[in-house]
């Protein structure tokens, strides 16, 4: 029986078993059989293609040529070879391969459409396996088609097709050309992005990236500008700036100290080792330094305000992470001398009071910078770039203060405050020719090198900011106004009773007395409140108020630093008693400098000038330039001023209230004051203000000294507490200023009549 037409898909067990049998053929026989098998292979392929095309449509039994049983193969020796049923996965026998071309020619070589493959009862066709099995064989296996009998009988009609075992999705055939194009496009996109980024980095952003890289390794240290000096009238330094260093630490870098030294123990490495060598230099305990060196902070203070010599010793140790940026410290070589005048700086260098604050724009200068490249450990790179902006030093200021005279004033008022058990004391020394302030003393005071050790009240310049009722020292304004207005003269006779009633208020003098007959000079010499009221009543309230204003009450003096304007009530707001109290210095409040300016005006022949505390300011050329004088005002005539001075000389006599103010060799004019002290803290009058203001020499005035003691407990009269301070300080000042003694004696002025 011919086997040429045996179908590949439904091959019997014999057909499948023929391949193993053929494998046992000896080599010569294989050579003869090989050509036949190769010639039959195309026929099997064609037959497979044809079967794929016809299977879905007709589902007819395989052609007779496919139903022929395969021929029996013989071994080389002629003996039949035992056949074994071949597994379903074995390759088709050579006979099936030979029949495939004929079957493939029966139909066009076209793949079945997906719709045909998905018809009920049929499994989708697949390409012929690479092993050589025919498509028909695979389809038959999947659809359950009957196999030929193993006995090699005739063809058997296949039964109805059973349900497909499983369905496969339509096969996808890739397009290599499209994949290649997509790959090329993707590669081009990637290279384009890389190229654009490269152009951006190396072309467009090159300078910016270089700048960022430089910034990451550069550091900028501030170079503080030296603050200008404050000097006294002779050029002596009262405040100056010295260089200091703040020692800082990078705790991450200091941990690398000596870590590469294998010859050292662990105690001498890292923060512990650095603390060991730093402790004796910085004069701090080892534990304190080690605590400040340990941690992960990139910036921390190890020590502040260190002298340059100490930093040099630390720098020579070459400890990584230890830095010493420059800083400065304000120092006051004379300690508390003129401290309230000078003021002080806060810990951050901010001026908080005095000349330091008022003239900060002149003193502070402009800070500079030093920019450099540094390495990983923070050390400067020697070959790196560096740029320095030099600081602009502040300008110096020269005061009118005389350091030696200021020292004497500070000492004398401090002792008297202690003796009188007073709350505070102030002293003002002025040159009556130009109104230069030669001394402004306060007690208690403070040391500007350590302002934190004093109370807040002691940090203020009481001579400029504290206001108080001047008392009898203000009677000179009433007397001068009356003389200037032609209402009185030094010899004007006045009857002074022991008590006088004005409105609902009785007025009396500081000491009880009967009716007295006093002249205007006697009223000043005895400091009579009642007599002053009688003289003041000869003028209108507005007239007297105008003279108070002209002498400087109620307005700032213009001295150039922080000060109070005092309190002067307008006439339209006077109470029933204010018109009378202001005549003898109550109901009006002034500062110590304002009160001293009144007497400087009398000493300057009736012309009030602007007090000066700042004599000169440094210019851009580094030289000091005198400041122009302030405005001046004619208050009274020279004749009136001279008459007032002559009357004031009677006060400093055995008949007056201030005999203790006499200065040997000099004529002295002055006035005592004992006023009620209004205490704002308790909201009422509490204690007294004891004062004395004098002029010397009275015949040729040069100096004015005002002394005030607030709330003394050991006495309260100005003649006994303030006048002695005046006498000692004026004696020293006249000698220091080389003022010649008076060549004449004071004139005789009548105090009583007839």
Image (cartoon, rainbow, N blue to C red):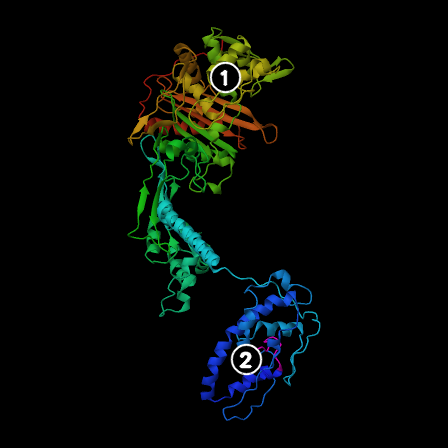
Query: Which quarter of the image is occupied by the N terminus?
Result: bottom right
Q: Which residue is mark 1?
A: 475
Q: Which residue is mark 2?
A: 95
Mark identifier at residue 625 = none
Asked if 486 appears above or below 14 in the picture, the reply is above
Q: Residue at x 51, y 37 (%)?
A: 456
Where residue 708 sits in the image (x, y, percent)? 48, 28
Question: Dot 1: what SS?
Answer: helix
Where residue 585 sits in the image (x, y, percent)? 53, 19
Where residue 226 sits in the image (x, y, percent)? 35, 39
Identify which residue, 195 or 574, lies in the foreground.
195
Q: CA distance from mark 2 to mark 1?
A: 152 Å
Rendering quarter of residue 46: bottom right
Q: Residue at x 38, y 62 (%)?
A: 257
Identify which residue, 434 or 622, lies in the foreground.
622
Question: Dot 2: what SS?
Answer: helix
Can residue 747 be found in the magenta stretch?
no
Tell me if mark 1 has few (under 14), some (14-19) or many (20+) residues whose alpha carbon lies within 10 angstroms of its own: many
Residues shaded magenta? 4-12
- In the rendered view, does 377 fall on the left or right side of 160? left
Identify which residue, 216 or 251, lies in the foreground.
216
Q: Residue at x 47, y 89 (%)?
A: 26
Q: How many marks?
A: 2
Can residue 10 be found in the magenta stretch?
yes
């Amino acid at each position: 029986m011919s086997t040429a037409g045996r179908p590949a898909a439904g091959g019997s067990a014999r057909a499948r078993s023929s391949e193993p049998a053929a494998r046992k053929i000896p080599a010569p026989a294989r050579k003869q059989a090989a050509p036949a098998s190769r010639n039959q292979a195309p026929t099997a392929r064609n037959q497979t293609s044809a079967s794929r095309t016809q299977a879905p449509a007709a589902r007819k039994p395989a052609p007779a040529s496919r139903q022929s049983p395969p021929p029996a193969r013989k071994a080389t020796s002629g003996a039949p070879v035992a056949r074994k049923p071949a597994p379903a996965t074995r390759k088709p026998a050579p006979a099936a391969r030979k029949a495939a071309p004929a079957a493939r020619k029966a139909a066009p070589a076209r793949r079945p459409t997906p719709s045909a493959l998905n018809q009920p009862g049929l499994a989708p066709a697949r390409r012929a396996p690479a092993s050589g099995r025919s498509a028909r064989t695979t389809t038959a296996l999947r659809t359950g088609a009957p196999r030929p009998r193993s006995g090699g009988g005739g063809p058997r009609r296949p039964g109805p097709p059973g349900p497909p075992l499983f369905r496969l999705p339509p096969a996808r055939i890739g397009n290599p050309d499209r994949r290649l194009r997509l790959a090329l496009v993707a590669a081009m996109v990637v290279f384009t992005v890389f190229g654009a980024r490269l152009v951006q980095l190396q072309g467009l952003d090159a300078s910016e990236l270089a700048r960022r890289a430089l910034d990451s390794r550069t550091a900028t240290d501030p170079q503080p500008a030296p603050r200008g000096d404050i000097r006294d009238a002779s050029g002596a330094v009262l405040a100056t700036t010295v260089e200091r260093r703040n020692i800082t630490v990078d705790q991450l870098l200091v941990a690398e100290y000596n870590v590469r030294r294998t010859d050292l123990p662990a105690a001498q490495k890292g923060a512990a080792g650095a603390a060991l060598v730093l402790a004796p230099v910085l004069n701090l305990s080892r534990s304190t330094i080690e605590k400040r060196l340990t941690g992960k902070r990139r910036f921390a203070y190890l020590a502040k305000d260190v002298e340059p010599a100490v930093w040099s010793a630390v720098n020579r140790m070459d400890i990584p992470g230890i830095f010493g940026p420059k800083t400065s410290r304000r120092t006051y070589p004379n300690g508390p001398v003129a401290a309230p005048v000078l003021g002080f700086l806060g810990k951050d260098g901010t001026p908080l009071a005095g000349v330091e604050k008022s003239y900060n724009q002149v003193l502070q200068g402009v800070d500079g910078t030093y920019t450099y490249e540094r390495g990983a450990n923070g050390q400067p790179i020697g070959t790196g770039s560096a740029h320095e902006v030099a600081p602009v030093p502040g300008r110096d200021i020269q005061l009118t203060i005389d350091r030696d005279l200021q020292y004497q004033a500070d000492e004398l008022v401090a002792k008297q405050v202690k003796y009188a058990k007073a709350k505070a004391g102030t002293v003002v020394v002025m040159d009556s020719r130009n109104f230069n302030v030669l001394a402004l003393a306060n007690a208690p005071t403070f040391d500007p090198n350590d302002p934190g050790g004093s109370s807040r009240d002691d940090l203020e310049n009481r001579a400029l900011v504290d206001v108080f009722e001047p008392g009898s020292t203000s009677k000179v304004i009433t007397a001068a106004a009356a003389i200037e207005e032609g209402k009185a003269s030094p010899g004007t006779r006045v009857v002074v009773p022991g008590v006088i009633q004005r409105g609902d208020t009785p007025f009396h003098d500081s000491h009880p007395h009967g009716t007295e007959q006093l002249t205007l000079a006697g009223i000043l010499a005895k400091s009579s409140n009642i007599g002053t009221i009688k003289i003041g009543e000869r003028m209108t309230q507005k007239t007297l108020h105008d003279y108070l204003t002209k002498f400087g009450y109620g307005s700032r003096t213009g001295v150039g630093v922080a000060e109070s304007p005092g309190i002067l009530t307008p006439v339209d707001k006077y109470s029933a008693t204010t018109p009378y109290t202001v005549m003898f210095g109550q109901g009006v409040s002034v500062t110590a400098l304002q009160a001293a300016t009144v007497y400087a005006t009398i000493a300057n022949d009736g012309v009030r000038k602007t007090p000066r505390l700042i004599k000169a300011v440094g210019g851009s050329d580094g030289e000091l330039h005198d400041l122009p004088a302030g405005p001046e005002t004619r208050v009274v005539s020279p004749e009136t001023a001279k008459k007032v001075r002559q009357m004031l000389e009677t006060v400093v006599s055995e008949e007056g209230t201030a005999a203790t103010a006499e200065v040997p060799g000099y004529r002295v004019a002055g006035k005592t004051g004992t006023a009620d002290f209004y205490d704002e803290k308790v909201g009422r009058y509490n204690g007294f203000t004891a004062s004395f203001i004098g002029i010397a020499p009275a015949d040729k005035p040069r100096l004015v000294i005002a002394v005030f003691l607030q709330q003394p407990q050991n006495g309260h009269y100005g003649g006994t507490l303030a006048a002695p301070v005046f006498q000692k300080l004026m004696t020293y000042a006249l000698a220091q200023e080389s003022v010649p003694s008076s060549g004449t004696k004071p004139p005789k002025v009548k105090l009583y009549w007839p």
